[in-house]
């Protein structure tokens, strides 16, 4: 059990790092830019994003941990971890583009790519561990909602 604590902590902190990167760009842009955008009626209150993302990053970290520490040395495991880090990179890139560059359109491009890579990650994770794949489903659903929200913000602010 002790041997697995370090990989678990590393996995969760790695995912939380993506959230910290996003927060750096988001926090300063909300009062100066984001609050002045026209948003759709289904836009959630700003306070909801932090707890939702924190929980999703924890779940992502646990999923990564499960795949990483699975005894299998298969090609599927390696591919799953690589695609996981691709989606995590796109996740970390979205906030600097959407909020930092103040570009809903480019944010939309990034989030569509993110959505696709999350779906591929889920498929790859399911091949290694059904639990790990299942842990990413809420993330996929949230990013699906966020994609619709991003699209709507872009359309309303053309």
Image: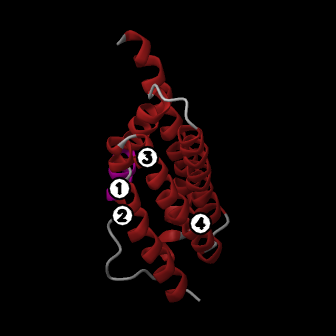
Mark 1 touches mark 3? (CB < 8 Å): no
Mark 4 touches mark 2? (CB < 8 Å): no
The quarter of the picture where residue 39 lies is bottom left
Query: How far apart are labels 2 and 1 at the CA level?
Result: 6 Å
What residue is shown with label 1?
137
The quarter of the picture where residue 60 lies is top left
Query: How far apart are labels 3 and 4 at the CA level?
Result: 22 Å
What residue is shown with label 3?
127
> What residue is rendered at 41% in x and 69% in y?
144
Mark 3 touches mark 4? (CB < 8 Å): no
Q: Secondary structure at mark 3?
A: helix
Mark 2 touches mark 1? (CB < 8 Å): yes
Q: Earlier in the sequence, mark 1 or mark 3?
A: 3
What residue is shown with label 2?
141
Counting other residues with Cα less than 10 Å from the Cα at mark 1, is it few (<14), some (14-19), or many (20 or more)?
some
Q: Which residues are magenta?
A: 48-55
């Amino acid at each position: 059990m002790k041997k697995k604590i370090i990989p678990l902590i590393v996995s969760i902190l790695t995912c939380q790092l993506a959230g910290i990167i996003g927060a750096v760009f988001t926090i300063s842009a909300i009062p100066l830019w984001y609050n002045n955008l026209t948003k759709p009626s289904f836009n959630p209150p700003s306070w909801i994003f932090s707890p939702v993302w924190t929980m999703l990053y924890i779940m992502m970290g646990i999923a990564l941990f499960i795949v990483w520490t699975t005894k299998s040395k298969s090609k599927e495991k390696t591919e799953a971890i690589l695609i996981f880090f691709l989606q995590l990179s796109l996740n970390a890139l979205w906030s600097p583009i959407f909020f930092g560059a103040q570009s809903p359109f480019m944010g939309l491009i990034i989030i569509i790519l993110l959505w696709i890579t999350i779906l591929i990650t889920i498929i790859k994770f399911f091949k290694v561990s059904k639990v790990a794949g299942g842990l990413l489903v809420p993330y996929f659903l949230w990013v699906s909602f966020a994609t619709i929200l991003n699209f709507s913000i872009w359309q309303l602010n053309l």
